[in-house]
Amino acid sequence: MPLELSTKPAALAALFMSMLLAGCSTQQSSPSSTHLTGAQHTLKLAEQAVSAYQRGDKARWQSLLCLKSVDDPLVGWNQVRSLVGDISNVKLVKIAEASTAGNGSDADSSTTVAYEVHSQKYPLKTLLLKFFPVENDQCVGLVY
């Protein structure tokens, strides 16, 4: 059934508003949309760090996080072991490449790889381990 003349402006207004609110997208082949080297590299190092932690490989953990001391505040081996304990049920929940898009937020401006884990000692039991690139490309940073 064709739209009546009186409903066309309302339909166009609704379409315009939905496009404005949701944004528009088109399929374009660009290197940046299919090539996530920063995120892929961070993911590779983060996977190694999580694996080293689960295996109890203190030296590898320290190396992957570029830490000089096992007593480094928050992310040093001893501190993480005392706050987090053993981890299990490791689930990759986020891989995000940094973006400088005009409509992005602060959270979009950095590369992040996040794992959800079950923690032996963390009071809420479920914890996010968020890895990010650092100046030394052989290491990752960590916040939790």
Image (tube, grey):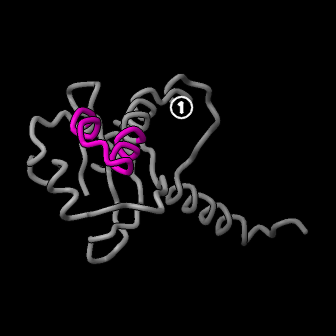
Q: Residues within 10 Å of mark 1 (few under 14, many from 20)?
A: few
Provide residue 32's location: percent of width, then percent of height: 49, 27
* Residue 29 higher or lower than 116, as above or below: above
* Residue 127 in magenta stretch: no
Q: Nearer the viewer, residue 128 or 14?
A: 128
| Magenta-span inclusion, residue 58 | yes
Q: Quadrant of residue 48?
A: top left
Q: Is residue 41 visible?
A: yes
Q: Is residue 85 left or right of residue 50?
A: left
Range drawn in magenta: 47-64
Outermost residue, right side: 1
Q: Quadrant of the N terminus?
A: bottom right
For the question of whether residue 103 can be seen, the reply is no
Residue 21, given in percent of the width and then of the height, sits at 50, 60
Q: Residue at x 42, y 35 (%)?
A: 39
- Identify the residue shown where x is 41% and y is 54%: 115
Tell me the quadrant of the picture where the C terminus can be found: bottom left
In the depicted structure, whether residue 63 falls above or below residue 74 = above
Which residue corresponds to the image point at 19% horizontal and 33% vertical from the top-left?
66
Residue 109 position by quadrant: top left
Disc 1: which residue: 33
Q: Residue at x 53, y 22 (%)?
A: 31
Q: Amino acid at mark 1?
A: Ser
- Please, is residue 97 above or below residue 136 in the view? below
Please, what is the dominant secondary structure of the magenta stretch? helix
Q: Who is closer to the viewer here, 118 or 108?
A: 118
